[in-house]
Image: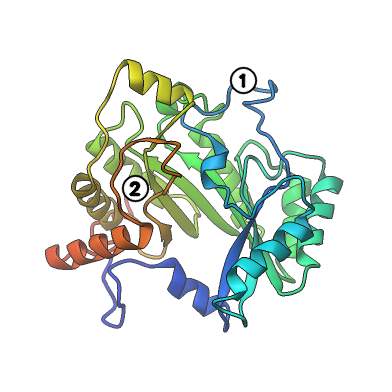
Amino acid sequence: MGHLPETKALPYNDFGTWLHSRFKYKVQKISVDAGFTCPNRDGRIGRGGCTFCDNTTFNPSYCNKNSSIREQLETGKKFFARKYPEMKYLAYFQAYTNTYAPLDTLKRMYEEALGTENIVGIVIGTRPDCVNKDLLDYLGSLSQQVFVSVEYGIESTNDTTLKNINRGHSFSCSRRAIAETASRGITVGGHVILGLPGENMPESLRQASIISSTELDILKIHQLQIIRGTRLGREYSEHPFHLYTPEEYIDLLTEYIRRLRPDIVLDRFTSQSPSDMLVAPRWGLKNHEFADRLANHMRAVGAYQGQFYDTNRP
């Protein structure tokens, strides 16, 4: 069973504190759109992509795939430098599958980013079925020189759910990719979505212990959002299903976090899609406002990360 250190300000391991422990200066991620696609979009393993996904919902306004990586980073730096002129940056390859290209192409892209002034590392968002030994060996070597993190879209540990959302891979694929990445000393992140069709609160809580049994360093948790124009958006309009209210989601997250491995760093709890693209749920809360509500609720009920973590469960 986990325990909350007395010096810890929040009832969970927050990303900001962890990042400050790695860098002795302010660091901000700058998103880059390098023009990738996904293998479940282009026909290699499927068509149409994940049923919930429209990547434009999380591409900031300064991203433009028609600009070079360096140009996008310089634009992003100007966006943030007004507030923090001494800031350093991580290049965040975010949109689509950012390892879905030949290794020579990937090296050129990553190294263009790292060659940009004040870029001190890279974060690579990808799928677990789009990495291989040569790429991971390269990233492992690179991570000895600069900060490197690979983020995998896990989404769910339930293979039936993964099939239903047209993910195109199993959870065992995610587990294997996480292990192989971690074995090379690379920081490993993962994304999960709570509230996917067919997954209720007990199912989500069951998955917390499974997520904890992987070698993940960082976890991003998202509430399910219905995005206009997606396949899931069409399914929702034809046959509406339950989406969590903020209060229900806070209750779920509290119990989920209690069951997580105490040392996993929690980067986020919510997504915030553009209003004109979001069908539901419309909470009207910014990410930091939700995080404050969650922390206050956890304190009020005496909850903390790892409280119910069971090392004997998978």
Residue 153 in picture, x, y percent from top left: 53, 42
> Three-letter amino acid code at disc 1?
Arg
Which quadrant of the figure contains the C terminus?
Answer: top left
* 176, 68: nearer the viewer: 68
Quadrant the N terminus occupies: bottom left
- Kindly report which numbered mark, 2 or 1, lies closer to the viewer in this rendering: 1
Disc number at residue 209? 2
Mark-to-mark CA distance, 2 and 1: 32 Å
- The x, y position of residue 80, in whole percent, is 59, 70
**Local secondary structure at mark 1:** loop
Q: Residue at x 75, y 54 (%)?
A: 137
Q: Amino acid at mark 2?
A: Ser
Which residue is tagged 1? 47
Q: Secondary structure at mark 2?
A: helix
> Relative to residue 205, is residue 72 depicted above or below?
below
Total marks in image: 2
Q: Residue at x 25, y 33 (%)?
A: 200
Say which quarter of the image contains residue 118.
bottom right
Few, some or many residues within 10 Å of mark 1 (<14, 14–19, 20+): some
Direction top: furthest residue: 238
Which disc number belongs to residue 73? Answer: none
Please tell me in which quadrant of the rendered image residue 304 appears. bottom left
Residue 148 position, x and y percent, is 66, 62
Left or right: 130 as drawn, with respect to 11: right
